[in-house]
Amino acid sequence: MLRMVPSSRSLYPVFILAPLLASALNVSIPLAALSTVPAVAPELISLSIEQDRWVDWAGTSAPNVFFYNALDNMVQITGEPPWIRIGADSEDHTIFSPGVEYEEDIFPPSTAITPYPEATNISAGYAFYEIISHLPAGTHVHWGVNLGQYNITAAYLETKAMIEAFNTPAVKQAGITLDFIEVGNEADLYISNGARNSSWDPTEYISQWSTFAANVSDAAGLSPTSYTKFIGGAFAGSSHNVTWFSPQAIFFGGILNSEPGSLIRTISQHDYSGSFCTGSGAVLQQLMTKSYIRGNISVFIPDISATHAQGLDYIIGEGNSMSCHGAPGVSNTAGAALWVLDYSFFASQVGISRLHFHEGIGYKYNFIQPVTLNYSILDGSPITPLPPHIQPPYYAAIIAAEAIGSSGDTKAIEIAVNNANITGYAFYENGALSRALFINLLAYLPGDSVRTSTHLDLNLGGYGVSPETMSLKRLEIGYANDTSGLTWGGQTYETSDARVSGQEVLQYIPVSAGIDIQETEVVLVQFL
Ligand SMILES: *[C@@H]1O[C@H](CO)[C@@H](O)[C@H](O)[C@H]1NC(C)=O
Ligand SMILES: *[C@@H]1O[C@H](CO)[C@@H](O)[C@H](O)[C@H]1NC(C)=O
Ligand SMILES: *[C@@H]1O[C@H](CO)[C@@H](O)[C@H](O)[C@H]1NC(C)=O
Ligand SMILES: *[C@@H]1O[C@H](CO)[C@@H](O)[C@H](O)[C@H]1NC(C)=O
Ligand SMILES: *[C@@H]1O[C@H](CO)[C@@H](O)[C@H](O)[C@H]1NC(C)=O
Ligand SMILES: *[C@@H]1O[C@H](CO)[C@@H](O)[C@H](O)[C@H]1NC(C)=O
Ligand SMILES: *[C@@H]1O[C@H](CO)[C@@H](O)[C@H](O)[C@H]1NC(C)=O
Ligand SMILES: *[C@@H]1O[C@H](CO)[C@@H](O)[C@H](O)[C@H]1NC(C)=O
Ligand SMILES: *[C@@H]1O[C@H](CO)[C@@H](O)[C@H](O)[C@H]1NC(C)=O
Ligand SMILES: *[C@@H]1O[C@H](CO)[C@@H](O)[C@H](O)[C@H]1NC(C)=O
């Protein structure tokens, strides 16, 4: 770690430019957390994996070291791996086939809008489930079974194979657990995707889900005392009331009163902030807009209240920036990393306990590309083989891990920043202020003449001893639409093995000096 000498703000060049480019704001941060401040778990930012290429992520005869390392980097920071959900769209196109070793897929043709389409037919065998042992020790897993194809034998055999895999010595020794089984993906879309006819509604859903879940429950040996439970919902959208698919509707319809329904512990909602399904353009600054991020999350507040009222946990079980694998120049950029950070921490403020960012091989919005790609993720054109690499949003997972830390008792509260484009969060360990994170969501793009900087004076107040010194760690970004070349505290994760490289650079300054944050930048403050 490169320790810079604590110095006054006047030594920094930005001070000289200040009259031209900088504006100043007062920011108040309480020194101690009130009891109402929400807890944030290390797994706040978790992953969802499209299961048609699960073997590419996990590795077959040996673990995929790149993917393992990318997850283990989080373990090195917080002590906990991200949670992994496996399933998604291909969950409803998978059957079990004992003659298949790992997985066999039938893929539709690649197109410019969807260079890496989801498989239409997937056959999974025993080893498909057994390679769950390749994840970091202690990983918590949700896995989906098929409801969409109305094939109860598929759901039954998938469950049997899954349970057998989680009972193998390799998985047990690693403490990798099956926390939840998900029965069906985005069942609210079954009319539009042709899985059901127009009679499909929440009542019919509850009936069929209960039939399938009863079979799965029996096959898996689930009970009120078993470790594994069910995830409920997993809907693409929400009506937010009892008239159509929503948590409210399935509670109203009595799902929790059925025997398998009584084993639901968490409600999963899927959420994307826009879509690239028809190839229409998206605008990076819109994704990064503070008020839109708050709007996209806040629509779920009634659903979260209804869920908590039933004593259940609420998560975003699948999501990312733009649906249909992301939008080019938006989802795969540095700006998207800032979106992931603010979206996730804002979600933690309204009762969302975990978010699973969706990943598939070659998807534009991925944090991680775990295998060599031979076609452009942007338009499907042939490319020189591109080895495994991380994409800019991965930095958000690292930064969140560092902000949350390894205390096992971290709480976070949003800091009121009186600026339309800057957000902030304060982190408390065992009740005392330890860190703060600031995000400047203004997209600095090629052609913008001026990159403004804002000065934040930090007023620490309330109960507790006020720290006098702080260290600053910056996510340095050239332009908001950069797809590589980011550095976090001077270090890079854009390496051939996903391990961090370079010397860490922190700035040590008095708290009274305040901080400067420029457009398209993240600053993590550690109070010393
Ligand atoms: C910040 O707060 C200090 C003390 O409370 C006050 O003197 C100063 O004018 C404020 N600055 C701004 C920009 O509001
Ligand atoms: C249903 O699933 C079973 C077991 O996975 C499979 O053998 C069978 O072919 C499937 N039926 C249909 C109609 O796809
Ligand atoms: C793919 O699955 C569908 C059922 O969804 C089935 O009708 C079709 O025969 C399968 N195709 C192949 C090539 O197995
Ligand atoms: C679950 O479904 C399978 C396949 O149809 C069947 O063999 C099994 O008996 C069912 N289990 C229960 C408890 O009904
Ligand atoms: C939809 O399918 C179900 C089951 O096959 C059937 O009972 C129902 O009549 C169908 N509804 C329509 C509108 O076709
Ligand atoms: C329920 O949700 C639907 C669909 O979003 C909406 O049209 C309707 O107004 C809502 N009803 C109530 C009572 O909020
Ligand atoms: C959600 O975010 C998108 C941009 O990503 C924006 O267009 C939309 O208006 C936002 N929705 C709400 C409810 O704020
Ligand atoms: C970033 O945006 C500029 C125009 O604003 C464009 O010329 C450039 O190609 C973009 N970069 C990437 C990597 O998409
Ligand atoms: C790209 O080609 C290499 C070499 O044939 C292959 O190993 C790899 O799986 C391919 N990538 C994808 C995503 O199919
Ligand atoms: C926030 O960003 C918008 C452009 O997205 C800009 O018009 C506005 O002036 C900015 N507000 C502040 C306080 O910098």
Image (cartoon, helix red, strand yellow):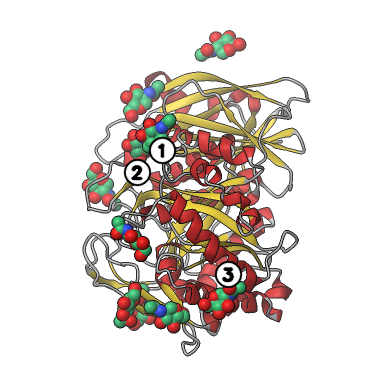
Residue 458 % position (x, y): 60, 23
| Cα distance in 3D space between marks 1 and 2 | 7 Å
The picture places residue 323, in percent across and down from the top left corner, at: 35, 52
Image marks 1 and 2: residues in contact by CB distance under 8 Å: yes
Q: Secondary structure at mark 1?
A: loop
- Asked where in the image residue 445 lies, by quadrant, the reply is top left
Residue at 27%, 59% in the rendered image: 378
User: As drawn, is 338 to the left or to the right of 407?
Assistant: left
Return the residue nearer the eye: 388 or 182.
182
Amino acid type, label 1: Thr
Marks 1 and 3, the one that precedes in the sequence: 3
| Residue 242, position as x, y percentages in the image | 47, 39
Give whichever of discs 1 and 2 has the lower sequence position: 2
Mark 2 or 3: the one toward you = 3
**Label 3 lies in ligand 4 vicinity (Cβ under 8 Å):** yes
Q: Residues within 10 Å of mark 1 (few under 14, many from 20)?
A: many
For the residue pair 52 and 95, the one nearer the viewer reads as: 95
Asked whether residue 63 appears in the rendered view, the answer is no
In 3D space, how far apart are the residues under numbered discs 2 and 3 (Cα atoms)? Answer: 52 Å
**Which residue position holds label 1?**
520
Task: Kindly identify which numbered label has been placed on residue 274.
Answer: none
Q: Quadrant of residue 222?
A: bottom right
Q: Is residue 223 visible?
A: yes
Mark 3 surroundings within 10 Å by alpha-carbon count, few (fewer than 14), some (14 through 19), many (20 or more): some
Tell me the SS state at disc 3: helix
Q: In the figure, is residue 195 to the left or right of 155?
A: left
Q: In this figure, which residue is indicated by the disc labeled 2?
A: 479
- Badge 2 or badge 3: first in the primary sequence: 3
Q: Which mark is residue 215?
A: 3
Q: Residue at the spot x=39%, y=44% of the render?
A: 335
Q: Is residue 514 above or below residue 379?
A: above
